[in-house]
Image (cartoon, rainbow, N blue to C red):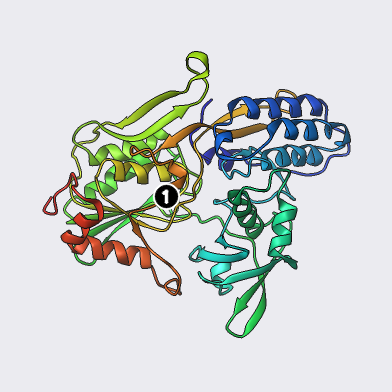
Amino acid sequence: MRVFAATFAMALLTTLSGCASAPRGVAADVDQLLAEIGEKYGYFGEQSIDWDAVRRRYAARADGVHSKAEQVALFEVVLDELHDAHAHLGTNTKHSFRLVPSGADLWAELDGARAIVTQVRPGSAAARAGLRAGQEVLAIGGVPVAQAIAERLGMSSADPTAHAWALRSLLSGRHDEKRRLRIVTAQGPRDIDLAAPEVPSGNGPLEHRRLAGGVGYLRIHNSLGDDALVPAFDAALAELADCRALVLDLRDTPSGGNTAIAEALLGRFVREPLPYQKHELPGVGWQGRSRVWVQYVLPRGPFTYEKPPAVLVDHWTGSMGEGMAIGVDAMRRGVVVGTPMAGLKGAITSSTLNQSGIRFAIPVERLFHIDGTPRHRWLPPERVDLVGHDGPGEDAILSRALEILAAPSQRESARGTTRFSASG
């Protein structure tokens, strides 16, 4: 079954403990995993990965597996060679690294050799510990950042995106290990012990309310894979129908969802079918050519919400959340405001390893904005720098969106000709 977001991981994650008896069929499962990745993974063209060398290295390790935990660990390191946060197993051990972004509360980028925090998830353990955007991380678990990254990487380590993947994985940490960071402060280096990142749990699939100035606010709670979201969204939209503008907050969608639900939501904002995302499936056409198509949103619901929406995004806008954001932009239906998103690649396909029954998912279809920009590289037109603006109670992204909605001239300059009118 094809799944279009990392909801698969959150729904199927189970925890395995070590097992005394050696699992059967490890070699066959490793061969299957390596072969399917080699045949189906959609993003080898973007990365300098010698998959044949990876296959030779890990196929030989199956004989050294003596427990279920070791089996899962072997499958994990195979997937790690992709340096792709959208590729994952459907199970984990206590020693597994947390998934990013769903299991992360920190986002960081490499500026040369320096690891700089660019966002801290509000209300998280990292935020309570005092971490803020702009701080430099010197060491993780007592290991200098450069050394920790080198140890986290596998065989293919030249790609800068691989280093960034490793950094964020290390900051999220393993399930069974405490996190300790050394950061730079005005008073000098400081060690910080962090509790495990929490998985936020909102009440219901969404929340909605009215903000000052007649603006409606609707926030989706990591529920883009939940069928209950659609009727809840419709009910909320009906209650906010008389608002002069709408804020659609996608900053709590790290696990993604599925296209059917996302398209149902987007369908409330259009009067006619509109293209919102381009797909490419490599190697399935004549003589190995790609199959390319454009996905459309169709109108849905008792009325079209035509008032000006602003869509909020950040690094916890993942997969199908990213698809909704680029869709709103592609349809010129609103302005997208925030930081770069999670950058999860493509649409994933899930498969089952024949011997163990363990499931895994990898990006197979390449996804693009209608203008041709790869979805994982697309940036919101209204960027917000959180350095110095992420203290307790601050919400710089929402504040910027409200400024835009209050000034039609700014809205037009940000997006050009739009398909909505300020008066509704």
Residue 106 appears anywhere in the view? no
Residue 150, visible in the rendered structure: yes
Q: Nearer the viewer, residue 260 or 228?
A: 260
Amino acid under disc 1: Gly
Q: Position of residue 98 (x, y in %)?
A: 64, 51
Secondary structure at numbered mark 1: loop
Among the 4 quarters of the image, the one containing residue 373 = top left
Report x, y in % for residue 239: 23, 51
Q: Position of residue 321 (x, y in %)?
A: 42, 45
The answer to which quarter of the image holds residue 150 is bottom right
- Which residue sits at x=48%, y=17%? 285
> Which residue is drawn at the image coordinates 30% and 45% (left, top)?
329
Mark count? 1
Question: On the image, numbered disc 1 is attached to which residue?
Answer: 204
Q: Residues within 10 Å of mark 1 (few under 14, many from 20)?
A: few
Q: Position of residue 315 (x, y in %)?
A: 48, 55
